[in-house]
Amino acid sequence: MYTLLIILLLIDSIALIGVVLLQSGKSAGLSGAISGGAEQLFGKQKARGLDLVLQRTTVILAVLFFLLAIAVVMFE
């Protein structure tokens, strides 16, 4: 069971890295980080198409990563 969890965690981490690298940058520089985050927070800038799919996939893979990491510690 432990080996299976480690293999799943490794596959999930590689997939998570790949999905994050596929996402396009939302802003450039420090000023973009401040204003871009506020715009995204209040919904002025909605993700569409491929960006939306990549964003949702990132969230799912991140949650799965944490669940698998907790499971690995529990079954160690």
Image (spheres, rainbow, N blue to C red):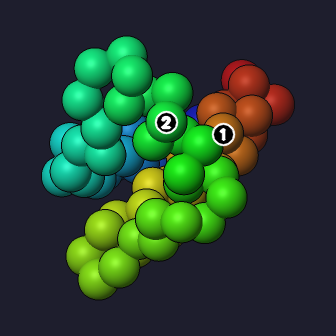
Residue 15 versus residue 53: which sits nearer the camera? 53
Residue 25, located in which quarter of the rendered image?
top left
Q: Secondary structure at mark 1?
A: helix
Q: Of callouts 2 and 1, which one flags the residue occurring earlier in the amino acid sequence? A: 2
Residue 51 versus residue 75: which sits nearer the camera? 51
Q: Amino acid at mark 1?
A: Phe
Q: Is residue 24 left or right of residue 37?
A: left
- Residue 1 shows up from this direction: no
Task: Report the residue marked by disc 2.
Answer: 35
Q: Give how far across and how far down residue 19 sits, in percent.
A: 28, 53
Q: Give how far across and how far down residue 30 sits, in percent.
A: 37, 16
Mark closer to the observer (2, 1): 2
Q: Amino acid at mark 2?
A: Ser
Residue contact between numbered discs 2 and 1, judged by CB atoms under 8 Å? no
Query: In the image, is residue 38 above or below residue 63?
Result: above
Residue farthest along the right direction in this orientation: 74
Neighbour tally class for label 1: few under 14, some 14-19, many 20 plus, Cα within 10 Å: few
Q: What residue sits 45% from the left and 55% below the top?
A: 58
